[in-house]
C-alpha cells in the first residue's frame, strides 16, 4: 500500500479515523477541525488561477 501511495502525483487529503476506541459502528461524525482542514485543503489545491478555466478530465 505504501509503495502505491508514493506514486500518487495529485494533491490528496485523507480523512482517517485513527482512534475509534474499539467500536465497530457510529463512525458517521467528523470533528469540526477535521472538516475545516479538509475545506482548507480543497480550497488551496482546487482554486482556479485568474485567466485560466477549471477543467475536468474524464
Image: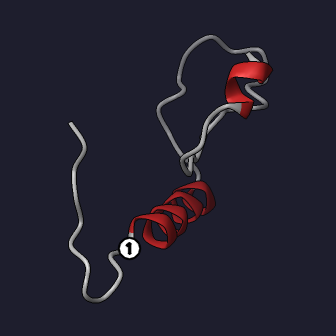
Instruction: State the residue lying farthest toward the bottom.
Output: 50
In the rendered view, how is the structure colored? secondary structure
Give the quarter of the figure containing the N terminus. top right
Q: Residue 18 at x, y = what percent? A: 76, 32
Left or right: where 10 falls relative to 7: left
Q: Secondary structure at mark 1?
A: loop
Residue at 49%, 65% (x, y): give it.
45
Q: Viewer-proximal residue, 52 or 27?
A: 52
Q: Viewer-proximal residue, 13 or 20?
A: 13
Number of numbered labels in the structure image: 1
Instruction: State the residue lying farthest toward the top.
Output: 24
Residue at 54%, 63% (x, y): give it.
41
Q: Is residue 30 above or below residue 27?
A: below
Q: Residue 29 at x, y = what percent? A: 50, 40
Q: Viewer-proximal residue, 55 or 28?
A: 55
Dividing the picture into quadrants, the one containing residue 49 is bottom left
Q: Residue 46 at x, y = what percent? A: 40, 65
Give the quarter of the figure containing the C terminus. top left
Q: Is residue 24 above or below residue 44?
A: above
- For the residue carrying disc 1, how many other residues have a C-alpha within 10 Å: few (<14), some (14-19), or many (20+)? few
Q: Is residue 47 above or below residue 36?
A: below
| Residue under pointer 1 | 47
Q: Is residue 19 above or below residue 57?
A: above
Residue at 53%, 57% (x, y): give it.
38
Left or right: where 31 falls relative to 28: right
Amino acid at each position: 500500500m505504501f509503495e502505491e501511495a508514493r506514486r500518487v502525483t495529485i494533491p490528496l487529503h485523507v480523512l482517517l479515523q485513527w482512534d475509534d476506541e474499539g467500536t465497530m459502528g457510529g463512525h458517521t461524525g467528523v470533528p469540526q477541525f477535521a472538516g475545516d482542514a479538509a475545506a482548507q485543503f480543497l480550497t488551496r489545491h482546487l482554486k482556479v488561477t485568474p485567466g485560466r478555466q477549471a477543467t475536468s478530465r474524464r
